[in-house]
Image: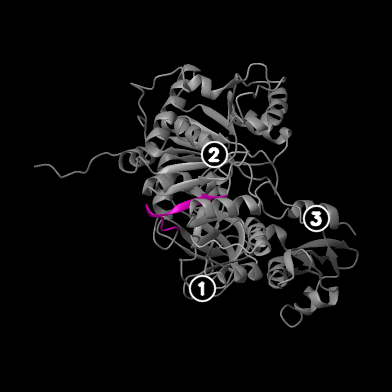
Amino acid sequence: MTDGATQDYALTLDRMLDHAAKWHPEKDVATRQIDGSLTRIGYADLRERARKVSAVLVGLGVLKGHRVATLAWNTQAHMECWYGIMGMGAVCHTLNPRLTAEQLAWMIGQSEARILIVSEDLQPLAAEIAMKVGTLDHVLIIDPEGPACSAHPDLPKAKYFEALLSQVNPDGLVWGDFPETTPCGLCFTSGTTGLPKGVTYTHRGSYLHTLRQLQADVSGLNSHDVVLPVVPMFHANAWGLPYSAPATGARLVFCGRQSDGETLAELIIGEGVTIAVGVPTIWLALFDHLDAKGLEVPSLKRIMVGGAPMNAALMRRIESRGIAVQTTWGMTELSPLGTAAPPGDARSPDTAGRPALGIDLMLTDHEGTPLSRQRGHEGHLWVRGPSVVERYYGQAEAATRNGWFPTGDLAQISEDGQLFITGRAKDLIKSGGEWINPTEIEALVSGLPEVAFSAVVGRAHEKWGERPVLLVQFRDGESLEDDDLLEALKDRVPSWWLPDAVISVPSMPLAGTGKIDKVRLRSLYGAA
């Protein structure tokens, strides 16, 4: 007698698009073009085009395990390339076009990618990269703006991908014929604490991340949803939405290169978007536009935010329209989702929610020793799970200790299991031998209705070592006196935490991921 068994069914990402093509073939992916028009394609046709991408890459010599770089926006063509690269067992190395050519060339040098897929309008940046890296065999152009477009003069060998797709037949091409532990993606961190570090995603990890994201207390997507991922596909897999939407048959709406308030409003209203996803800075522009034009967005039921703390005043503005705000926390190394506030929960904008099945959390002291009490105390946050990085790309040493990854965040876990990110260890300000947490000050100031963004950085001080400086960007037409800003902090933080100076800035500098660029602020305002 033998034991029973279940089928060996590899958890590979090509199955996401296969499922959508078979069971939701007409559900469409819409992309806004630069001229404001929309292109549409059903999942079945998108899958066929993605298989043609694989056939083109095979013809160019790409094998399983090879890295293929993409420098592109949130578009249908980029999604086709994702699945075409990953489906054949190659690795999609996404590049952030908001970084410099030097940074991107360094990343390509690390990944050893020989092919670069680039959106047409990003050809000048691609040309700079190609001159610096010197090892690219092919540059393939997607997202053409029109029939009269041409390759950049410094990319004489660049080819339009569409012409190559018309010349191949994917019949006989096999997707998914590899172990589920095969790498599928490569994304470099922003490098705020040193050189960027490459995070390798696997099919298994991303598949399980998708299942975790689809839980009802997380994204809870279903086939009736229309999803607008403003979070970029070049940053942490657009939070996995190009996988989870086809996995459920939800429609996808891509905004292309434009994510201004007017563009997003047009897409949400015109396409009946039900769920929109992105960093808080995006939603400030959207709701400023809606308020200025007197527009309503009746289809929009929920906004998922992450990547930076949620402005309390902005959250109130959104929820006053009957739109739920769902706060989350994650990072590139987590693929990227870590925790989410369940939809409909009464909560503050400070909570990052709870972990879903597949992610575990632990708080430690500064030496990494677990706190004896995990609830109600601040500590250093560590995580583990099947989609959490174990080792950075190209590095021999593990990034974990005893199976746990140190996030670099300071956090508390409430008695009911809610995670509160209380700061970044690297952002703490040491003044007179004592620590000041900028995040607590920023949360209070950002809660003022006149404030769009706030940031606190340390300024060198001869006596105290460092002292906090408050930087504020006001909403259009609004202002406050320095004393009024500081009054919002009195009796709510220790008196010695009060900033020594308040500086009004016309616009807060943002990093390539849409977060406030603390490195830039420290360089501008951190000197004595």
Q: Which residue is mark 2?
A: 75
Dot placed on the residue nearer the N-terminal end, 3 or 2? 2
Q: Secondary structure at mark 3?
A: helix
Q: Which mark is residue 522?
A: 3
Q: Which residue is mark 1?
A: 375
Q: Secondary structure at mark 1?
A: loop
Residue 207 part of the magenta-drawn span: no
Say few, some or many: other residues with alpha carbon within 10 Å of mark 2 (under 14 / 14 to 19 / 20 or more).
many
User: CA–CA distance between discs 1 and 3?
Assistant: 33 Å
- Residue span colored magenta: 219-230
Q: Quadrant of the image for the C terminus? A: bottom right
Q: Is residue 89 visible?
A: no
Mark 1 vs 3: CB contact within 8 A: no
The residue shown at (59%, 69%) is 349
Residue 106, position as x, y percentages in the image: 68, 32
Q: Is residue 24 visible?
A: yes
Amino acid, disc 1: Arg
